[in-house]
Amino acid sequence: MSKALVSFEGSIKDAEDLLAHFDAMPKPPPANAEVLKRAGLVMALTAWETYVEDRVREEVARRLRVVNGSYVGKFVAARLEDELKRFHNPTSDKTKKLFNDFLEVDVVVGWEWANYDSVKAKKALDELISKRGDAVHRSKPLAVGAPPAPHLIKREELEKAIRFLRGLVEATDKALVEE
């Protein structure tokens, strides 16, 4: 098990805690409770993004051990850090490119578990990344006297997203271990 996977397990807990807070609210929950589900989605996908960054760093460092401190080792490490500064919204294509560029591993082909194959997993990840963008940039303020806007993310969707990201991280870690 990678250090990045262990760290992910701690980070995804934040999203689960937000979901638990939502569940603990009186029923029906107040209109402003939707913010907990949006924040949960943001936290869950931030855990994914951090996992990807940490995992590629971890594996590159492992592979560079023999050239650590040399010109080549310093160059690759610096190049990776520059790339990670621009690595936002880790879609399936961006994630695939990052691992392919620095490790020559197509992690996407390993994205197979339970009810997912790589095509379905890519689509699900990209949809979640898009929804995270909406949750962050397109939240709808409540208008006084107007009926509440439909929630961007339903409770079951957040729970499913957390389960999906757990599976995705495990599949990614496995793909790198098997390499």
Image (spheres, helix red, strand yellow):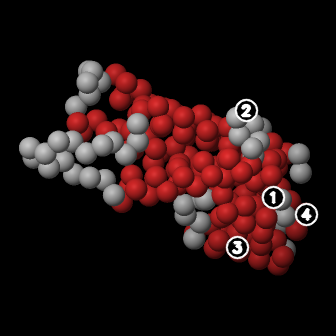
Spatial CA distance of label 3 from label 2 is 37 Å
Residue shown at the point (54%, 39%) measured from the top left:
161
Q: In this rendering, is residue 40 above or below 77?
A: above
Type of amino acid under label 3: Ala
Mark before the other along the chain sequence, 2 or 4: 4
Pointer 3 residue: 78
Pointer 2 residue: 114
Spatial CA distance of label 1 from label 2 is 20 Å
Q: Residue 138, image x and y in percent?
A: 33, 58
Mark before the other along the chain sequence, 1 or 2: 1
Quarter-wise, where is residue 163 in the image?
top right
Pointer 4 residue: 66
Mark before the other along the chain sequence, 3 or 2: 3
Spatial CA distance of label 3 from label 4 is 16 Å
Q: Residue 177, image x and y in percent?
A: 85, 45
Please indicate, yes or no, whether residue 50 appears anywhere in the rendered image: no
Contact between marks 2 and 4 (CB within 8 A): the answer is no
Q: In this rendering, is residue 69 above or below 178?
A: below
